[in-house]
Image: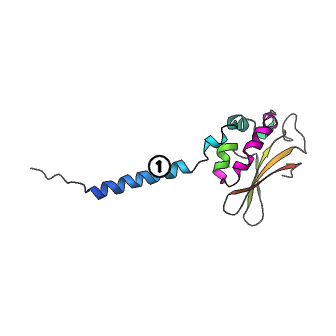
Amino acid sequence: MKHIPIIPVCVLLMRFSYVSILTLFFFSCSADQNQFKEFDSIAWKKDYKACSGQRLAMKKDFEQIKSKLKGLDQMEIIDVLGKPDFQRLEDRHMKSYLYFLEPASTCTTGKADAKTIVVRFNSVDRAFEIIYEQGTSL
């Protein structure tokens, strides 16, 4: 007769706790989409460099979520706003994401002094300032 090993209960509990921790980590790593339900992220992301003018039409919606974006990390910002149109490296290990609000100069109807939204991140990759700039130098 073969001996069938019995796994101790504590080993099963440890495995269960690892799975629980990984699940919790996975769900806590992205921005809570419910807090941005009034904002159409898909439409914003599709309007790369604001060439179709959709982002400018969404300015009021953006204003409603602007304060909720502060404190999010870079990946959470990308979840909501998509990849930035441009990135800028600042002093002291800080970075900025730039999103055109008006059509960029590379668009058919674009202009050189297009308005942008600048999301500035601190040295621990958290958004701490969100401002508008006119005629951003890239």
Q: Residue at x 74, y 67 (%)?
A: 92
Sort mark 1 into few (<14), some (14-19) or many (20+) by Cα contacts within 10 Å.
few
Q: Is residue 91 above or below residue 117?
A: below
Judge from the rendering whether residue 135 lies leftward or rightward of residue 123; answer left or right: right
* Image label count: 1
- Of residue 60 and residue 137, the one placed in the foreground of this image is 60
**Residue 65 place in picture, x, y as percent:** 72, 44
Judge from the rendering whether residue 22 lies leftward or rightward of residue 58; answer left or right: left
- Of residue 26 and residue 32, the one placed in the foreground of this image is 32
Disc 1 is placed on an element classified as: helix
Chief secondary structure of the magenta portion? helix
- Label 1, on which residue? 23
Residue projecting furthest to the left: 1
Q: Which residues are magenta?
A: 53-75
Q: Residue at x 83, y 46 (%)?
A: 116
- Of residue 28 and residue 38, the one placed in the foreground of this image is 38
Q: Residue at x 71, y 34 (%)?
A: 43
Color style of the picture: rainbow
**Residue 84 place in picture, x, y as percent:** 73, 47
- At label 1, the amino acid type is Thr
**Residue 114 place in picture, x, y as percent:** 87, 43
> In the image, is residue 52 part of the stretch drawn in magenta?
no
Q: Residue at x 9, y 50 (%)?
A: 1
Judge from the rendering whether residue 30 lies leftward or rightward of residue 81; answer left or right: left
Res. 80 image quadrant: top right
> In the image, is residue 71 part of the stretch drawn in magenta?
yes
